[in-house]
Image (cartoon, rainbow, N blue to C red):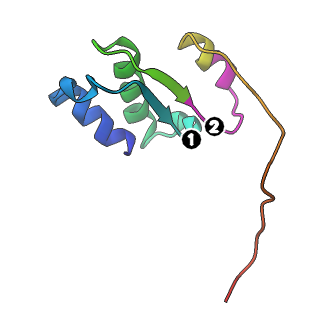
Amino acid sequence: MVNEKLKYFEQLNPEFLKNVCEVVVDELGIISEKSRGPQLEIAITGLLQGSYKPAVLVLTTPFRISEQLLKHMGGFLLETQERPIDIRAGVWK
């Protein structure tokens, strides 16, 4: 689900997370965007400080403050250069 929807559930129906063990947050880098960043920050804070504490895995490409942010969240950086599937760009018909 999008982070705005997660924030909604955290605030209006916290029981929603009662049986959730793991949450994957994709594109952590948008946290620095003016439009969506604050929503993502609130959603992640709700996960980390709420009554139910699922394991949180965040995925991102490196960005300026990624290591500082992960440290602040109590997390760590696991970085890899491995790409099991080649990226192919083009137009297919």
Helix, strand or loop at label 1? It is loop
Instruction: Give the side of residue 91 with respect to residue 69, left or right.
Output: right
Which quadrant is the N terminus positioned in? top left
Residue at the bottom extreme? 93
Residue at (76, 70) in percent of width and height: 89
Taking 31 as reference, is 59 left or right? Answer: right
Where residue 39 appears, x then y in whole percent? 37, 34
Q: Which residue is mark 2?
A: 60
In the rendered structure, does residue 84 fall within the stretch colored magenta? no
Disc 2 secondary structure class: loop
Q: Residue at x 54, y 27 (%)?
A: 57
In the displayed structure image, the side of residue 40 where residue 64 appears, left or right: right
- Residue at the left extreme? 12
Q: Residue tagged by mark 1?
A: 27
Q: Viewer-proximal residue, 68 or 58?
A: 58
Principal SS element in the magenta part?
A: loop
Q: Amino acid at mark 2?
A: Thr
Q: Position of residue 72 (x, y in %)?
A: 56, 11
- Disc 1 residue type? Glu
State which quadrant residue 60 falls in. top right
The residue shown at (51%, 40%) is 33
Quarter holding residue 4: top left
Question: If the image is split into quadrants, where does the C terminus sit?
Answer: bottom right
Quick one: label 2, few (<14), some, or many (20+) residues within 10 Å?
few
Residue 63 counted in the magenta span: yes
Q: Which of pointers 1 and 2 lies earlier in the amino acid sequence? A: 1
Q: Residue placed at 62% from the left, 12% from the top?
A: 71
Residue 61 appears at what percent x and percent y?
A: 69, 39
| Number of dots carrying numbers | 2
Q: Is there a contact, CB below 8 Å, between mark 1 and mark 2?
A: yes
Q: Which residues are magenta?
A: 58-68
